[in-house]
Image (cartoon, grey):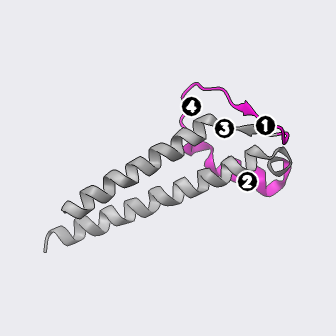
Amino acid sequence: MSSRPARTVITIIMNLVIAAAIALTARLAVEFFGQLSAKSWGEAIIAITDPLVIPFGLKDIKTPYGGVFDVNAALMVCGLLVGEWVLAGIRDRA
């Protein structure tokens, strides 16, 4: 029975990781289209997700839609999804 609380805690962490990945994906969509990032709600999404993006030192790529593709945020999404996959494996063994 002691593994039950561990599974619950890992599941909660996994849900938070997925929520962060979804938020960063929304950030990618807002930044990709420049007009969306100029809206107040677009600025709010970018401001909320700023602490989640680790600066890997890669430059943003300009898009033909007046925005940018945030490479650092995209790498964070990939990293979060890999982390969630690892946590799922740990949870299955707990």
41 lies above or below 77: below
Image coordinates for residue 38, horizontal then vertical, percent: 85, 47
Label 2 and label 1: CA atoms lie apart by 21 Å
16 lies above or below 52: below
Q: Find out whether the residues at labels 3 and 1 contact each other: C-beta distance under 8 Å.
A: no
Mark 2 vs 4, N-terminal side = 2
Check residue 35 in the rendering and tell me which mark sits there, or answer none: none
Image coordinates for residue 71, horizontal then vertical, percent: 62, 35
Residue in the picture at 67% in, 47% down? 28
Q: Decide whether residue 55 is among the magenta residues.
A: yes
Q: Find out whether the residues at labels 4 and 1 contact each other: C-beta distance under 8 Å.
A: no
Label 3 and label 4: CA atoms lie apart by 10 Å
Q: Which residues are magenta?
A: 38-66
Q: Which quarter of the figure has residue 11? A: bottom left
Label 3 and label 1: CA atoms lie apart by 10 Å
Q: Please, what is the three-letter code of the amino acid marked with disc 4?
A: Pro
Label 2 and label 4: CA atoms lie apart by 19 Å
Residue in the picture at 23% in, 70% down? 5
Q: Which residue is mark 3?
A: 70
Task: Tell me the mark number nearer the camera, choosing from 2 and 4.
Answer: 4
Quadrant of the image containing the N terminus: bottom left
Image coordinates for residue 79, horizontal then vertical, percent: 45, 43
Q: Which residue is mark 4?
A: 55
Check residue 44 in the rendering and tell me which mark sits there, or answer none: 2
Mark 3 vs 1, N-terminal side = 1
